[in-house]
Image (tube, rainbow, N blue to C red):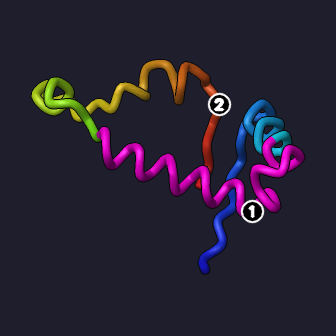
Amino acid sequence: MPKVEITIPEHLEMQIAQMVERGEFVNREEAIEDLLSTGIKAYKTSGPSDEEEGTGTGSTGFEDDGMMGHDDEYVF
């Protein structure tokens, strides 16, 4: 399996650690893999709306305010 290094905001790291501590996941690696997989499935299911596709800008709605309103940098 390929390895990926990412930098995430402290608040996300804390949420992942709490889920592992509560026993929702065996470890951080499993948590991140499962959460990422779930997010990709959700994105594929919802996808861009017809309204966004019709604008011709190619905007996903994330560029202006950062991901989820945060200006944190995500590195893959």
- Mark 2 belongs to which amino acid? Asp
Residue 26: quarter of image = bottom right
**10 Å crowding of disc 1: few (<14), some (14-19), many (20+):** few
Q: SS for tag 2?
A: loop
Q: Position of residue 19 (x, y in %)?
A: 79, 44
Q: Is residue 24 magenta?
A: yes
Q: What's the residue at 79%, 57% (across, down)?
A: 28
**76 versus 4 height, above or below:** above
Residue 57 vs residue 17: left or right?
A: left
Residue 40 lies left or right of residue 58; in this view the side is right
| Residue 42 belongs to magenta span | yes
Which region is colored magenta? 19-46
The residue singled out by tag 2 in the image is 72
User: What label sits on residue 1 in the rendered view?
Assistant: none
Front residue (pair 57, 23):
23
Q: Position of residue 69 (x, y in %)?
A: 55, 19
Which quarter of the rendered picture does the N terminus lie within?
Answer: bottom right
**Residue 71: percent from left, percent from top:** 61, 24
Q: Earlier in the sequence, mark 2 or mark 1?
A: 1
Quick check: 56 above or below 24? above
**Residue at image point 53% right, 25% down:** 68
Q: Would you place residue 73 above or below residue 34 in this image? A: above
Q: Residue at x 10, y 28 (%)?
A: 54
The residue that appears at 76% across and 55% down in the rendered structure is 25
Q: Mark 1 highlights which residue? A: 29
